[in-house]
Amino acid sequence: MASMAAGPAAIARPAPVCRRTRTSTRGQHPHRQLCRSGATRDDITAPAGFVPPEPQKFTVAEGQLGNVLSAAVPLVLRLGTGALINGWKPTLAPDDGEGYSLFRVAGKKLAEGSDLGPRPAQPIEVFEYEGSPYCRKVREAAAVLDLDVLYRPCPSGEKYYRPMAKAEGAATFPYMKDPNTGAAMTESDDIVEYLFRKYGPVANGRGAVDEMGAAELGVPMMLQRGGITNLTCYAAAVARLKGLKARPSRAAAAAAAGTPVTPLDLWTYESSPFTKAVRESLTELAIPHVVHYCPRGSTKRDELLARTGTFQVPYLEDPNTGVKMFESAAMVEYLEGTYALASK
């Protein structure tokens, strides 16, 4: 949905909802300072007998081919925006046996470079919903810039995060808050340019960035203001028509009771067709979640490999239940079985 609200100065910024922040540990990337309670919840439990599946690379779950193909339509329409990190540059380097690499051969490995700006100490916070073409632009920009983002789902009918955003002055979505700078704004194009201004390569002291336009900021063509961006984002949204309307959920009930669930953690990149259905369920069930974007060239691929012993996305961790898992179809089954409630 297009935004009509005024810029950052017009948005009130009360204290964030999550107040318990895990302090960083030695060697921890500053992205990892996230809101966490440190314990599972008694009122949120995984389905009885649920066992996370083993990761199966380059496979599609039985009966899911059509779903994955339809989820790949936005990938094609948007020319893969969000799959590659900003300034992605592949090179052959000596294979030291460390970290993630797409391939290793004859003592060499594929090394992937990037061109980024300063890294934010805390995740960017975005109120949005999966089915919005305007929200998609912001998600793609965050992926290109290799950011971590705390998403507060605001589909139609959601009764906690939508009122929260509107109480702060947001008339439409997406609505972004940056706890690192205090900035808050709507308008997807403004948000995209803000992210490149603060966290793109121009932020490394390369001039008066406040006066720069999208091209000068290094915003990719498919994310710049104008017809081709909006047209393809709309077409990508129409290809699925999901992630638009809230459904009853335990997450929504917990938020209404004043005890919102702890945000889940999701590792992915925006254009992944395997992640689409997972994000749709997270949105419709109003489950807050932190997305750790790891496009090609991201060092978070190394981090996920070290964390799990393999690299595959999507990868989901739920601190409310302790479940950690790969495999997108199983994730959707888990989210529906754990959080969905029957409609009244």
Image (cartoon, rainbow, N blue to C red):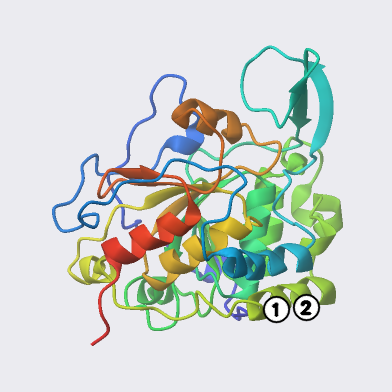
What is the residue that sits farthest to the left in this orientation? 42
For the residue carrying disc 2, how many other residues have a C-alpha within 10 Å: few (<14), some (14-19), or many (20+)?
Answer: few
Q: Is residue 184 visible?
A: yes
Q: Amino acid at mark 2?
A: Leu
Where the C terminus falls, by quadrant?
bottom left
**What percent of the width, then of the height, locates residue 159?**
32, 78
Circle number at residue 18: none
Task: Look at 27% across and 84% down and name the residue there.
Answer: 343
Measure how far apart labels 1 and 2 are at the Cα level: 5 Å
Q: Who's the residue at 70% across and 40% down the image?
A: 296
- Comparing 189 with 260, the one in front is 260
- Residue 12 in view: no
Give the label on residue 234, or none. Answer: 1
Q: Secondary structure at mark 2?
A: helix
Return the x and y of residue 145 as percentages of the image width and height: 67, 46
Residue 227: x percent and y percent? Answer: 83, 77
Question: Does residue 200 appear left or right of residue 152 in this picture?
Answer: right
Q: Residue furthest bottom?
A: 344
Q: Residue at x 71, y 32 (%)?
A: 102
Q: Quadrant of residue 44?
A: bottom left
- Residue at the front extreme? 62
Side (left or right) of 204 relative to 53: right
Residue at numbered disc 2: 231
Q: Amino acid at mark 1?
A: Tyr
Q: Nearer the viewer, residue 111 or 20?
A: 111
Q: Are marks 1 and 2 in contact (CB under 8 Å)?
A: yes
- Element type at mark 1: helix
Q: Is residue 133 left or right of residue 121?
A: right
Total number of numbered labels?
2
The residue depicted at 30 percent of the width and 70 percent of the height is 340
Q: Nearer the viewer, residue 117 or 306?
A: 306
